[in-house]
């Protein structure tokens, strides 16, 4: 019986991966939600097939009675396709840094999103800005000191 459950899980994952590979970003959000719910039900003690049936029933009901969701409150991770809260700086699924404006993946030490131009606020970027301000301030104080000394 246990090998049948494992085989059933493998089949569901293969179907999921096939659908996810060709799905639109909106459909990927739904597929991710379905798989998360399926896994949650299995963790609660249901078999893979029971969990899958229950998850399908829940989502079928949701499709018939769509919830009022503000689309502006979510964005899609440009790396893994997971739905991400509008204010998140990291994807909860893959953990990669993403643009808070558009969800585009960001590389290390990026100061602006290459896709939308949103300024990226990170410790490194803030330190750079602060460092340049301190450098210019120190130079200004140095030259003012030189002027004062030369006038004495």
Image (cartoon, helix red, strand yellow):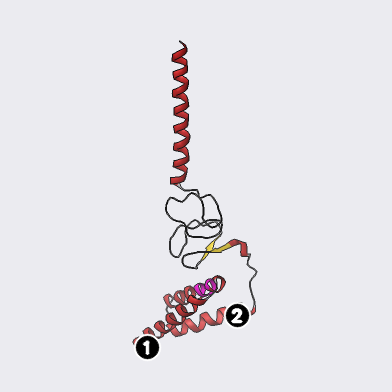
Residue lying furthest left: 3
- Please report the residue visible at 57 percent of the width from the left and 63 percent of the height from the top: 74
User: In the image, what residue occupies the spot 45% across and 19% down?
Assistant: 145
Left or right: residue 5 versus residue 113 is left
Along the line of sight, the residue nearer the viewer: 21 or 41: 21
* Residue identifier under label 1: 4
Circle 1 packing at 10 Å, graded few (<14), some (14-19), many (20+), is few
Q: In the image, residue 95 lies at what x, y percent?
A: 43, 61
User: Under tag 2, what secondary structure?
Assistant: helix
Q: Residue at x 56, y 78 (%)?
A: 59
Q: CA distance from mark 2 to mark 1?
A: 28 Å
For label 2, the crowd category at 10 Å Cα-Cα, with few meaning under 14, some 14 to 19 and many 20 or more, is: few
Residue 25 drawn above or below residue 122: below
Magenta-drawn segment = 28-33
Q: Residue at x 48, y 21 (%)?
A: 144
Nearer the observer, 66 or 145: 145
- Disc number placed over residue 61 in the picture, else none: 2
Q: Is residue 36 visible?
A: yes
């Amino acid at each position: 019986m246990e090998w049948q459950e494992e085989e059933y899980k493998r089949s569901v994952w293969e179907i999921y991966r096939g659908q996810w590979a060709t799905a639109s970003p909106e459909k990927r959000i739904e597929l991710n939600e379905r798989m998360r719910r399926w896994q949650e039900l299995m963790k609660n003690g249901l078999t893979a097939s029971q969990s899958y049936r229950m998850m399908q029933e829940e989502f079928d009901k949701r499709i018939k009675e769509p919830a009022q969701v503000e689309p502006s409150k979510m964005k899609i991770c440009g790396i893994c396709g997971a739905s991400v809260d509008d204010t998140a700086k990291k994807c909860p699924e893959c953990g990669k840094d993403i643009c808070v404006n558009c969800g585009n993946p960001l590389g290390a030490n990026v100061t602006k999103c290459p896709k939308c131009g949103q300024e990226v606020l990170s410790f490194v970027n803030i330190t750079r800005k602060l460092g340049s301000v301190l450098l210019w301030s120190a130079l200004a104080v140095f030259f003012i000191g030189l002027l004062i000394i030369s006038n004495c």
